[in-house]
Each structure stands twice: as structure tokens, then as C-alpha cells.
Amino acid sequence: MRLSIYFLSLFFLQSTATALWCYDGQYSCEEACRDPGQWAAQFPSCEGLRQSPINIVTSKAHRNSALPPFNFIGHNQDINISLKNTGHSAHFSLPHSVRLSGGALPGKYRAENFHFHWGREGIPGAEHTIDGERLPMEMHIVHVKEPYGSLAEAEHDIAGIALLSFLFEESADDHPHLDTVIEALGRVKNNGSSTQVINFKLSNIVPSASDLHSYYRYMGSMTTPGCEQAVAWTVFKRTLPISSRQLSAIVSKCLFWSGQPMMDIYRPVQPLDGRVVYKSNSGSLLPSLPLLYTLHILLHI
């Protein structure tokens, strides 16, 4: 009997240890975790002054001609990637051959992963809002500044991480290549499960850099604990299509670590706290960011 109690206690401790935080939708049914309003109790950076996501007020964004186009490297390559259910989300790991430069970023960056944030059927779940409007879904491509070897190393640099955000807007037609993602998500239903996606091409999901000259830029944080304030955010103005059929399929594929349906996986918007949001000149063909502009950005966060 004592042995049974010991193992039950051990299981409970292990479960709570891996589940210190959760999203609002989870918290309503699971009191053992901390919802977004309580994240800072365990992860102090989550109440910092440069938190993400934010609401972007388009009329207040400062136009800046020193925000040039990006250079996407490896987006047209056929790559083999792994997908894992992390218990909070589903992460598609990317090879280091996928890289990023330009866009006024202070250096070159290599890709780590991409993932999505969604709501539930009939309820939008993008993280960033535009003029108060929340769109159905958001895709993040996470990049680490070279020469850092990991996200953990990059978190000590105010721009050590570059996050590209793509917002999805509901369309009458399917996204022509999103079903590959949906099918893969169906193979990682449970926490910890993983699979391989063969011959995947990022350019099938997101447009080429030449079609993405218009974007917003601000300095912020990761949107999950520990909310590290080390992110140069780029939110593209151009939205990507997703049909209601595809959206319904995506939100029903995976389960949280708690066994509940993985829905409403987004953090509420955070205060701007005096930060400046910049917007690019869509026709800009300027060279990379000079040192003076780097200092200007850092002085306005």
C-alpha cells in the first residue's frame, strides 16, 4: 500500500513539475497549473516591460525607411523536419541551413523552429492583434542570432532572437499547402509524441521575401514562459489564407499535457509600456541596418 502511494505521489510531482504553466482555456479545468495572469509568479520576466504579444495600432506605428526587405535562405529547399507535441504546442524543428538576414536585423540568424497559435472553432487565436482585431491563427518562425548555439544563449542578447510572425485570415479557399501541416499534426496527438515530415518546403507555406516588404517591427519577448525579453519581432502586414475546413481540422488534432484538447493556445496581448512600433516602407530597397540605427532602436524600447 505504501509503495502504491509512493508511486502515485511521484507521478503527481512529475506531472506538476512539467506543467507549471498553461493557457487560459486549460486553467478552467486544471487547477494545478498557472494561467497567463499567474505566469510571473514562477517566471518573473513575464511581468517585464517588453512583453509580447501586443496590439498593433496601425495609425500610431512610426514609418521608418531604414527597414529594408529580408533575405530568406533555405526557404526553397526540400528539407526533412521533425515535429513534436511539447504538451503546450507543436514545434516543427528546422535545420540550420534555413537562415535569415536583412530586415534591419543586427546580424545573421539561423532558424530553430516554427509553430502555430490558434483558438478553437469559431473563436480566433492569433497572438498579435491589429487595431484590436484578432485573426484566426498565427505562425511564428523562430531564429537565433549567430554565433549563439542555442535559444538559451541568445536570450541574454536584447536582439538575440528574431521572430517572424505571419497572420492567417479566413478564406473561402484552402491554403494550397497547409494540409501537409494538418496531416502531420494528426500524427502527434499526445504530449511527447513526434514524427518526421519529409521533403517539406517553407516557401510552400509563406511567401517569398520579395513579396514581404511591408511589416511592423518592435522589441519584445517570447510569448511563453520564461517570456525572455530578447526578441526582435517582425509582424508581416500580408496575411495568409486558411479555410474554415482547415482551421477546424488544425484545432482538433492535438492534446495538451493534461489530456485536454489543444485549443486557445495564445497569450493575451501585453501593454506596450512606452515602446515604439515601427513600420517599413513597402518599396524600400535600402541596405542593411547601420550601427547608428541599431542604437536608435535600442534607445526606444
Image: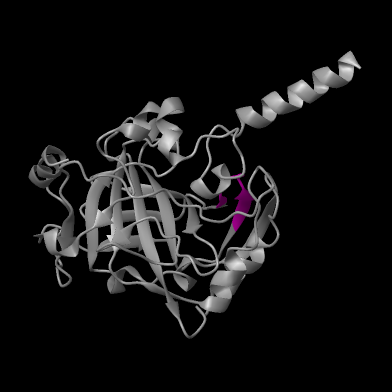
Q: Nearer the viewer, residue 244 or 146?
A: 244
Residue 28: x and y in percent read 56, 45
Color theme of the render: one colour
Q: Is 265 rendered above or below residue 71? A: above
Q: Describe residue 243's horizontal placement relative to residue 129 as left or right.
A: right
Q: Nearer the viewer, residue 99 or 261?
A: 261
Which residue sits furthest right?
Answer: 1
Which residue sits furthest bottom?
Answer: 172
Residue at the image point whose x is 35% and y is 30% from the top: 45
Q: Describe residue 32's horizontal placement relative to residue 175 as left or right.
A: right
Report which quarter residue 98 is drawn in.
bottom left
Which residues make up the magenta segment?
Answer: 81-90
Residue 63: x and y in percent read 10, 61
Q: Is 3 rendered above or below residue 204? A: above
Residue at the image point whose x is 48% and y is 57% from the top: 117
Q: Is 106 rendered above or below residue 241? A: above
Residue 300: x and y in percent read 12, 42
**Which quarter shows the N terminus?**
top right
Indicate yes or no whether the magenta region holds residue 43: no
Q: Describe residue 62's horizontal placement relative to residue 242 as left or right.
A: left
Residue at the image point whose x is 63% and y is 50% from the top: 84
**Residue 149 in view of the camera:** no
Report which quarter residue 135 is drawn in.
bottom left
Residue 242: x and y in percent read 48, 75
Q: Main secondary structure of the magenta part?
A: strand
Q: Nearer the viewer, residue 300 or 10?
A: 10
Which residue sits furthest top?
Answer: 2
Q: Describe residue 39's horizontal placement relative to residue 7 as left or right.
A: left
Q: Nearer the viewer, residue 108 or 232?
A: 232
Report which quarter residue 125 is drawn in.
bottom left
**Which quarter shows the C terminus?**
top left
